Amino acid sequence: MMTSPPPDWTSGTPRSAPDSVNPHAVEHKMIQALENGEFVVYFQPIYQIKPLLLVGLEALLRMQTKKFGLVLPVQFIPELEQSGFILQVGQWMLETVCGQMEQWQSDGVGAIAVSVNMSDLQFRTPQLVSSLRQHLDSHRLLPRFMPVEIKEKALTVDWDYSQRIVQELCNAGLPIIADNYGIGEVPLQQLAETGIFQVKLDISLMKALVGNPDVLTRVQAIVNQAQKLQMRVIAKGVESDSQLKLLQVMECAMAQGFFLGEPLPAKTIPALLKAQHSES
């Protein structure tokens, strides 16, 4: 059965083709959203699989509007990227995440790694590394607690440039995660040679994992090769016990997804961390 497209938060009408959106109107809406405090950051738990242990969080951008409530990224991230306003919002998000991490530590919650996503446009910005270091330094945070997620596809656009930026990130002490991995053609060996030692599997692989021998074989091959290279694989989009059990058998290092924990507002994270500390 066909369903109607989701409403476009910028107009309240059903979403149509992306090119039907007025870029100037969208940018104006984005500026208003930032000024009105409508952008919010949620945090999704990342677990070590064996034994199951909370080891990190991924910072995720959301919008909380009066008219539409919580707006998911699929409805506004493309507009942010097309308008270029992703750069301003990206800076706001870095500041917000670092401020939240500092607050958790001040409250005695403890330190936990929080990964942040870099859009393709952010990754191409010359000030990327200096901006990250500035945010971390101003909040007295160690770089190792902020892994930077870069899409595998973005890394392949200009490999020489990517190698240089990755090396600068590594020199700054920032761990790097190759996101959406497994659907491109970059060998793990090539990533490891640049200093990338974590990959996050593309969500499409997880959706097809159960009942698809070809995908199962592909994921197992990635995990096996990663172990040889002393790399860690994170499975993204785990939504069932069946998926998790297969990952356990394959000895995949880490996982995240709604089955393990949905994205949470910042105020709920201290209780989550304290609960784990009391169990350990």
Image (cartoon, grey):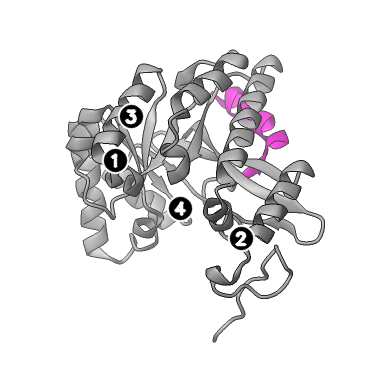
Mark closer to the observer (1, 2): 2
Mark 3 or mark 1: whose residue is earlier in sequence? 3
Mark closer to the observer (3, 1): 3
Q: Which of the pair 47/93 is nearer the observer?
A: 93
Please report the residue visible at 42 percent of the width from the left and 23 percent of the height from the top: 174
Disc 3 from disc 4: Cα separation:
26 Å
Which mark, by number, is residue 83?
Answer: none
Start-end of magenta stretch: 263-280
- Main SS, magenta residues: helix
Q: Within 10 Å of the Cα at label 2, are there few (<14), some (14-19), or many (20+) other Cα atoms?
A: some
Whether the residues at callouts 1 and 4 have beta carbons within 8 Å, the answer is no
Q: Which residue in the protein does label 1 denote?
A: 251
Q: Which residue in the protein does label 2 denote?
A: 23
Q: Which residue in the protein does label 3 denote?
A: 166
Mark 2 or mark 3: whose residue is earlier in sequence? 2
Residue 52 in view (yes/no): no
Disc 1 from disc 2: Cα separation:
46 Å
Mark 3 element type: helix
**Which residue is situated farthest in the bottom direction here?**
1
Side (left or right) of 84 relative to 24: left
Mark 3 or mark 4: whose residue is earlier in sequence? 3
Side (left or right) of 217 relative to 25: left
Q: Position of residue 77 (x, y in %)?
A: 56, 53
Q: Which of the pair 44/157 is nearer the observer?
A: 157
Which mark, by number, is residue 237?
Answer: 4
